Amino acid sequence: MSIVINKHIVVLVFLIIGVFSFGQQKESDRLRKQQKQLNDKITFTENLLKSNSDKKSNLTNTIGLINSKIRYRQELLNNINLQQKQLNTDIISLKKEILDLQLKLNALILSYKNMVKLAYKYRDNTSSILFILSSSSFNQANKRIEYLDQITKFRADQIRRIKLIKQQLIERIELLNAKKIKQDELVKGKEKEKQNYVSDLQKQKLFISSIDDKNQQLEDELNQQKKKSKEIRLAIDKAINKEILAERERIKKKPKTVKETKEVKLNNTGFLSNKGRLPWPVSKGEVSRGYGKQPHAVHAGVFTYNNGVDILTVKGSSVRSVYEGTVSSVLLIPGAGKAVIIAHGNYRTIYSNLQESYVQKGDKITSKQEIGSLLINADGTMSQVHFEIRQITTDGQIKNLNPSYWLFK
């Protein structure tokens, strides 16, 4: 009974070790994936800054990009620190495994040597036969035959186990060496990123110093931003309110069918279930202004309010729908280009600052479908999409939602 329990304990221990190792591997994979994503973001931000390097027409965006780049550098350093910590844990664990395997191998080899010595005594058939014939009884002779047979089988099994542990040792040592190489690479990479981080901080200081005499331009940009935000907000409010009134009038004339009610409910549920997983409205972009109350990039104590998020991207990029739905409005907003509103049940996604719209009211849209192209900014260096999410409540109110909680991170 105790042998069975001990076997179960051994199996349980190995299962726990296996699950722990699998968890460690998953964490390592996640960190490597995050490292790649951060490097991609840094490269994309650098490219946007390079395209704007000889222009000074939008200082706010430039400062925002520099700040984002520095933030990504810091996140990358944190990521490398976590990878180093993970690797150190793995290396310590591997060294212990190698030591345990080596001790087990030594014990098996010693046991095998003792068996070889014993086998030497019965190295020919005569010795084995004499050993059996010298038995005091038939029962003892039978046991001696079984004993000799067991020794032969056990010796073969010991050889197999020795070979297996040797192979395990080779694999563990190879893995340990690979981890050490990775550790060296991370140390070098971390040093390089530290230098890049310090360099970007210096560039940030130099840029801010170079625009000390640009306060008027910054103020003009801020006022223009506020004016544009207000125009977008009023135009969208007007369009959605018009949709709500039109829907109420339609229901008065002809109440919603069961099918229509179910369809709206399904659209609401589908959109809500994708919270935090929606694709971005551009294939690649950098948030230049977040949702809600936002501090000015330079002037302390100065804030703006944003009903959505502003995302900088490569000039002339296409805009895509973040979820399937129906185009409910296509607007022309002075100073903000065209805007497309897509209905997803009682939810609305809004895409502003479009040069051209590829869709019209009533069109059925699929997720990630291109719906228009973006305006190019005044100096011809990049484009920016203004993206919002709103919800029409049961009492007909329009509620602003933070897109950062809905878009995939």
Image (spheres, helix red, strand yellow):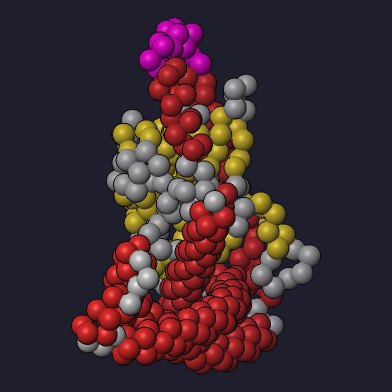
320 sits left or right of 26 in the view: left
- Residue toward you, 184 or 247: 184
63 in relation to 54, above or below? above
**Outermost residue toward the front?**
136
Question: In the rendering, at what x and y percent does residue 234 appear?
Answer: 58, 40
Magenta-colored stretch includes residue 340: no
Snapshot quadrant of residue 5: bottom right
Image location (x, y in percent) of residue 346: 50, 29
Vertical side of 240 occupied by 88: above or below: below
Count of marks overlaid on the render: 0
Work out whether residue 220 can be spotted.
yes
Q: Position of residue 157 (x, y in %)?
A: 32, 74
Q: Residue at x 43, y 83 (%)?
A: 111
Q: Position of residue 369 (x, y in %)?
A: 31, 47
Q: Is residue 348 visible?
A: no
The stretch drawn in magenta includes residue 259: yes
Residue sitting at x 35%, y 66%? 137
- Tell which of 201 and 48 is nearer to you: 201
Q: In the current view of this chain or complex, which residue is farthest to the left?
A: 125
Residue at x 55% of width, y 78% of height: 93
Q: In the depicted view, which residue is nearer to us: 141 or 6?
A: 141
- In this rendering, is residue 362 above or below 289? above
- Write down the region rendered in magenta: 248-260
Query: Chief secondary structure of the magenta span?
Result: helix
The front one of 188 and 183 is 183
Q: Quadrant of residue 85?
A: bottom right
Q: Residue at x 60, y 57 (%)?
A: 290
